Image: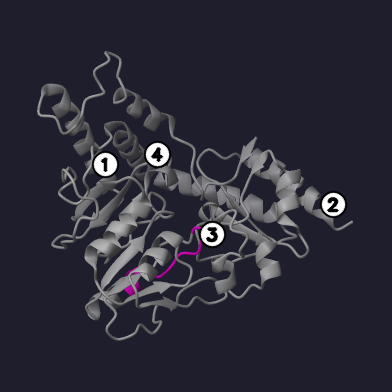
Amino acid sequence: MIYLDYQATTPLAPEAREAMLRWLDGPDGTGFANPHSPHALGRQAHAAIELARERVAGLFPAGGRVIFTGSATEAINLAIRGSAAGPSAISAIEHAAVRDTAMSMGDCRNLPVNSAGIVDAEVPIAEGTKLVAVMQVNNEIGTIQPVERLAQRATAMGALFLCDAVQGAGKLDAPRGADMIAISAHKFHGPKGVGALWLRDGLEISSMITGGGQEQGLRSGTLSPALIAGMGVAAQLAVERKNEDAAHVEQLWQRARECFSGWTLNGSEEQRWHGNLNLRREGVDVSRLMSDCRDIMFSAGSACASGSGRPSHVLKAIGLDDRAAKGSIRLGFGRYTTLDQIEDAANRINAAAAAQEV
C-alpha cells in the first residue's frame, strides 16, 4: 500500500501516539482521570493539557490564546458564529466548513480567484463587510493565499479576519495579522478528533456549546487529555522538524513532477505547498483509475466532498469545465513518504491512465 493522501489526513507520528497512551490509562493505570476534577489525578491530567496548549501555541503568532475544539470544523463554526460579525466575504475556494457556515449566517460574498487559484491581494471587498475569511493553503490544489495582506486590509476596514490554516499549520509560518486561526491536529501527524482555534489578544467571542464551560467558557464538555497531548507533541515535532520536513517534501515534489510529466498541473506551481500535487489528464476516468490502482491511496478531490458526484467547486473556480475537473486527481505526500513510493505510484498511475487511451 502506498499512501498519497496527506491533505485528507496524515499518518500519526509515533511520538504523538506514545504521548497519547500515557493519558488513556498509563503504565500504572492512572492516566484516565478527568482533567476538570480537583483531585491529584485530575490535576495531573489538567497539567498535561496545559503543556500541550503551550506546544500548540508554537504554531500560532506570539500572544493570543488557544481554545481546544473537537476539530477544525468546530473551531471555524465557533469563530464565525461566536463572533456574529455581520456581512462576510470569503474566497471562492474555501473549505466547506467556512463556506457553508458563512453562508448560513447570511449576506456572504465570494472573493474570486484567478486561473492559478490565487486570490488577488487587492481584490475589492464590499464596504460594510465585517468578517473576511481566506484560507492559508487550499486543501484541494495547495495554493498559498496572500493572507497577511488581506488581513491588513480587513483590519483597516474594521472587519475581523479568519484564517483556515489547517493545511499550512506546522509547514508554513503562522499567518500574521489574523484575528482568528483554525487548525486540526490530524493534518500535521496528530490524532483525529481534536483541533484548535487561536484568538488574538483582546478578542471576545460567544460560546457555541453551552454546559459546564470547561474550555475557557467557550467550549463546554470534558477535554480529552490523550487527544490533546498527542496534538501537543505533534505540534512540537512540526516546529522542530519544519525545515527538515520542507526539504524532504521539495525532493518528493521535484521527483513527482518529473514522473507525472504527461499531466497538467492544477493551480500555481510556485505559490503553493509542494506537498500537494493536483493534476489532470485529458480523457481520464478517475473512478476507473482509482479502481485500477486501488492499493495506492490518492484522491479525486477533497475527502470532505467525496461521494457528492459534483465537480470540485475549487477546480470550477479556477476555470476548469466539468470534464477537466472530473479528470483531476490529488496526490498528497510528506514526512513519511519515500522517493521509491512516489516513483512506484507514478509508474502504476501512468500505466493505468495510458491503458484507458487504448
Q: Give the side of residue 52 with respect to residue 135, left or right.
A: left
Q: Which numbered disc, 2 or 3, marks the residue that appears first in the sequence?
A: 3
Tell me the tag on residue 190.
4
Picture quadrant where residue 329 is located: bottom right
Tell me the tag on residue 142.
none
Instruction: Write the start and end of the magenta stretch as one range.
Output: 139-150
Tag 3, which secondary structure? Answer: loop
Q: Give the side of residue 156 with respect to residue 258, left or right.
A: left
Residue annotated with mark 3: 140
Q: Residue furthest front?
A: 211
Is 2 in front, or is 39?
Answer: 39
Measure the C-alpha gap from mark 3 to mark 4: 20 Å
Secondary structure that dominates the magenta span? loop
Measure the C-alpha gap from mark 4 to mark 2: 38 Å
Residue annotated with mark 2: 355
Residue 145 appears in the figure: yes
Residue annotated with mark 1: 55
Name the residue type under label 3. Answer: Glu
> In what quadrant of the picture does the N terminus appear?
top right
Q: Is residue 125 above or below residue 18?
A: below
Measure the C-alpha gap from mark 2 to mark 3: 26 Å
Tag 2, which secondary structure? Answer: helix
Disc 4 vs disc 1: which is toward the camera?
A: 4
Measure the C-alpha gap from mark 4 to mark 1: 13 Å
Was residue 135 drawn as part of the magenta stretch in this picture?
no
Name the residue type under label 2. Answer: Ala
Q: Which numbered disc, 4 or 1, marks the residue that appears first in the sequence?
A: 1
Q: Which numbered disc, 3 or 1, marks the residue that appears first in the sequence?
A: 1
Disc 3 vs disc 1: which is toward the camera?
A: 3
> In what quadrant of the picture does the C terminus appear?
bottom right
